[in-house]
Every structure is written in structure tokens, then in C-alpha cells.
């Protein structure tokens, strides 16, 4: 999993989120921006400076950090306690999977595509919960003027498209895996750039 496009995407996500921050009600976005800064650094180290076993440890920790931050972020977006409880349950499933991976089987130095697949699928469910909530609570503000809409749309494109790549990753030979990971990061880049452009557009209209 060595591709310089990935840490670049997280830096671009950082810029996109920072541009959207306005007022004191943006704590969730500050948390998200900090996550992307750390993600860019960690994945950059994993891509360029770490041996194979450390690369895998960093990726496993990164995926757990991802589901932790995204669970917090999406819980702040949904409007009902039922959806918030469902997000908590899904997070606990991911927490259990990570604990099993790291503490029980002690496979933190190995790539576990099924664990990654659970994380991707969890975020897809989060995205659908948000969109269902958005459609039920329509107001005068166009959804096209909401940064959260564009961000979550980008997440849905990325995590849903790449779920099958992640989940079936171990079933392909080494050469094909490299090509699949390139496709994976290309989709991430498209998602990132679309979110950044939307953030710039919204900011221009705001001022």
C-alpha cells in the first residue's frame, strides 16, 4: 500500500474542511480537520518511511481512527436518538473487530481486508443515515449550499465504490492488487477534489 496520492488527498481534505469552518458551532469540523492532518502524516510515513510490518500497523491504527472520528462526526449530523444509537452500535462492532484483531489474534502487523471492509461498509451506512435525515428535514437552505452534503456525498462515492476492492483484496494476485490500489486511490482523489471544489464554491457564495 504505497501510493503518494493517498497522503495528498488527506491534505486536500484538510484544506476543504478548513475552508468550511465558520463560527463557534464548527467543533466537529475542527476535529475532522485535525484528523485529516494526522492522517496525511501517518499515511505519508506508512508510504515512504516505514518497513512492511510498521506500514501494516499504521494502516490498522488509521482505519480504527477513521471509524472513531467518523462515528463522532456523523452522530453530530443526524437528528434522532435512534440514528445516534445505531451509530453507537456500529462503532462498537468496529471496536470489537479492532480489539479482536489487535488483542486476541495479535494480527496488528497483518492486512485484514475483512476488518477494513467492515469499516468501509459502516461509513456507507452512516452516509445513508445522513441523506435519509436530510430528505426528511428539508428547509429553505439549498442542500447544494451545505458543505456537509458535499462531504458526505464524496464519502459515499469513495467508500461504496471501494468497499469491494477492500473486501476482496486478498483474493487477487500481487500484480492485480497494485492496480486495484491505484484505482482505489484514484477514486479517493476524485472524491477529495470534488469536495474541495464544492468547499471553495460555497465559500465564494458566502462572501
Image (spheres, rainbow, N blue to C red):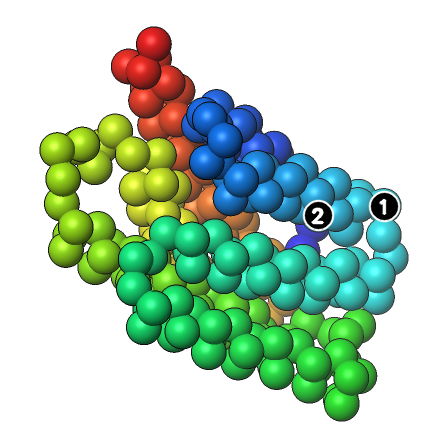
Q: Nearer the viewer, residue 49 or 37?
A: 37
Dots 2 and 1: beta carbons under 8 Å? Answer: no
| Residue at the image point whose x is 25% and y is 29% from the top | 145
The x, y position of residue 6, in whole percent, is: 60, 43
State the residue position of label 2.
Answer: 43
Q: Residue at 12% of width from left, 33% of height from top?
A: 140
Screen quadrant of the C terminus:
top left
Please give the residue where the numbered disc 1 appears in the rendered image: 49
Estimate how packed mark 1 is, as few (under 14), some (14 to 19) or many (20 or more) residues with alpha carbons within 10 Å.
few
Give x and y (percent) for residue 201. Answer: 32, 19
Left or right for 83, reference 54: left
- Residue 181, percent across and down? 55, 55
Q: Nearer the viewer, mark 2 or mark 1?
A: 2
Residue drawn at x 16%, y 50% as measured from the top left? 137
**Which corner quadrant holds the N terminus?**
bottom right
**Residue 111 at x, y percent in the picture:** 68, 72
Q: Is residue 151 left or right of residue 47?
A: left
Position of 92 relative to 62 (above/below): below
Q: Judging from the image, what secondary structure is the residue with disc 2 in? A: helix
Q: Residues within 10 Å of mark 2 (few under 14, many from 20)?
A: many
Q: What numbered label is drawn on residue 100?
A: none
Instruction: Tell which of 206 and 198 is nearer to you.
Output: 206
Residue 122, located in which quarter of the rendered image? bottom left
Amino acid at each position: 500500500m504505497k501510493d503518494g496520492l493517498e497522503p495528498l488527498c488527506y491534505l486536500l481534505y484538510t484544506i476543504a474542511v478548513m475552508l468550511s469552518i465558520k463560527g463557534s458551532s464548527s467543533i466537529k469540523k475542527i476535529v475532522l480537520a485535525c484528523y485529516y492532518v494526522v492522517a496525511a502524516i501517518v499515511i505519508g510515513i506508512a508510504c515512504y518511511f516505514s518497513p512492511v510490518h510498521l506500514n501494516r500497523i499504521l494502516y490498522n491504527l488509521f482505519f480504527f481512527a477513521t471509524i472513531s472520528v467518523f462515528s463522532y462526526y456523523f452522530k453530530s449530523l443526524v437528528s434522532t436518538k435512534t440514528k445516534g444509537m445505531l451509530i453507537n452500535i456500529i462503532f462498537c462492532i468496529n471496536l470489537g473487530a479492532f480489539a479482536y484483531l489487535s488483542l486476541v489474534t495479535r494480527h496488528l502487523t497483518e492486512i485484514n481486508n475483512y476488518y477494513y471492509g467492515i469499516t468501509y461498509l459502516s461509513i456507507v451506512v452512516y452516509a445513508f443515515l445522513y441523506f435519509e435525515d436530510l430528505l426528511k428535514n428539508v428547509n429553505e437552505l439549498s442542500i447544494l449550499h451545505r458543505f456537509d452534503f458535499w462531504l458526505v456525498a464524496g464519502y459515499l462515492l469513495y467508500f461504496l465504490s471501494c468497499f469491494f476492492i477492500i473486501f476482496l483484496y486478498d483474493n487477487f494476485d500481487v500484480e492485480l492488487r497494485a492496480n486495484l490500489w491505484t484505482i482505489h486511490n484514484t477514486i479517493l482523489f476524485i472524491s477529495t477534489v470534488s469536495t474541495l471544489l464544492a468547499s471553495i464554491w460555497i465559500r465564494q457564495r458566502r462572501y
